[in-house]
Image: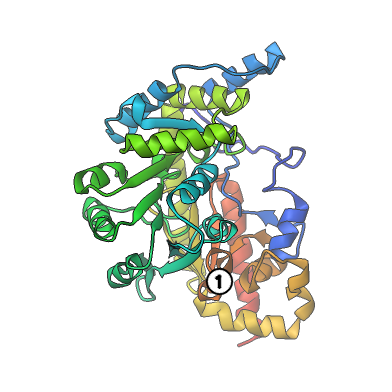
Amino acid sequence: MLYNFDRSIDRRPTLSVKWNKEAIKSLCGNPDAEPFWVADMDFSVASEVTQKARILSDHAIYGYPHATNQRQVFCSWAKKRHLLDLQPGQVVISQGVLTSIAILVELLSAEGDGIIIPLPAYQPFIRIVNNLQRTMLGWPLLYDQDTHTFSLDWPLYEELCKRARILIFCSPHNPSGMVFGHQDLIRLCEIAKQNNVVIISDEIHADLSFETHLTLLEPARQVGCEAVVCMAPSKTFNIAGEHYSVTLFNSSELKKRFVTRLEQLFLSTPSLVATTLALASYESGGKWLEELLVYLQKNADLIEKTLQKEVPSVVFLKPRASFIGLLDCSAILHLVERDAQEHPELYDSSASAQGGLLSRFFGQRAGLAFNDGTWFGGEAYRRFVRLNFGTQRSNIERALLHIKQAVAFLETTYR
């Protein structure tokens, strides 16, 4: 391998929110817990990208950027990575996927309109709906407790579409790790078209799929459904702090409205650093990504097999994309509740307002910071925590040991 993903990097002296003690405490009440939460990785970027960043740093002037080849560079990447035939005229560059989604919701709906969000959901989707005073229509995924898998609830989707203006979709899905096939995407678009629902598809994890990723843009075109796709280099190449996104359109009219709104808000030009890193990543990061995906899958395999063998009461929902996955803790939830009754000081919600029962348990008893399942859609998901395994394997091994010890404590103490 050309790249060393096992090299440990101390991020604590930086401005990393993932390693910020106050942020960690807000999740689990323990500021010293080791972070496995927010979705960025503990890997250095590709050396080719580092070289571009170093040249910029050595130059030591950070003026306004001007890069006329950005859309062409992305089209080349999309063709190579996803066999996606795009024209530069379909592509808009802007300052972040969430910014793009919020603007699209604003453009395509009015206050009070229904917005469908599959649940569990990346929480900022819910905030966008609430901030813009739209009506959230939750679309809970079906969950099979025997196979520990999620699936789409089609009858409910059809009912919700009758009351909706927009669907905010996420493909691959965060936090479940689902990857959607052609028939699912066609069906999604057909039902949306029948009800005049516009689909905004967040595909920020697309490049990190462990299998073929099918973007929604082509099924939407085939069906005649209005849809917009949002992508970015941020998760793919671990440059999430550099806000840069790519929004893809089938409709030239909608694209024109979107560009006009970006210009009205002065949001159409990413920074010099963001532009430099994004272009370098798309042009030179392919080999790094190939090796990263192998490393991530081995991390996921390790988590799955170790828990099955040593901690069977905690189940890893092995994702089919990206570096985040859910742990189903249903079998120990009643024991955690007992622990909270016996030691309420460890589960003080005022000390961890962004957490829940399970994130506090793992923070206090295992010294590990996870996103609590309730963050993704409320109490219906309290059985889960989300684990970020985009880190060195030694960190994964240590985390698994701490999980084993914490669960053993529960099972010894309260059974």
User: How many marks are shown on the rendered structure?
Assistant: 1
User: How far across and how far down the image is residue 253, in percent?
Assistant: 35, 36
Q: Quadrant of residue 357?
A: bottom right
Residue occupying image coordinates x 40% and y 56%: 166
In the image, residue 63 sits, relative to residue 177, either above or below, namely above
Q: Quadrant of residue 214?
A: top left
Pick the front one: 18 or 302? 18
User: How far across and how far down the image is residue 252, in percent?
Assistant: 33, 34
Quarter holding the N terminus? top left
Q: Which residue is mark 1?
A: 378
Apparent side of residue 101 relative to residue 402 in the rendered image (left or right): left
Residue ranking furthest to the bottom: 415
Pick the front one: 352 or 32? 352
| Identity, as a three-letter code, of the amino acid under mark 1 | Gly
Q: Residue 188, can we see it? A: yes
Pick the front one: 113 or 312? 113
Pick the front one: 388 or 295? 388
Residue occupying image coordinates x 67% and y 48%: 18
Q: Secondary structure at mark 1?
A: loop
Residue occupying image coordinates x 61% and y 50%: 395
Neighbourhood count class around disc 1 (C-alpha, 10 Å): few under 14, some 14–19, many 20 upward: some
Residue occupying image coordinates x 69% and y 54%: 34
User: How far across and how far down the image is residue 274, in percent?
Assistant: 58, 28
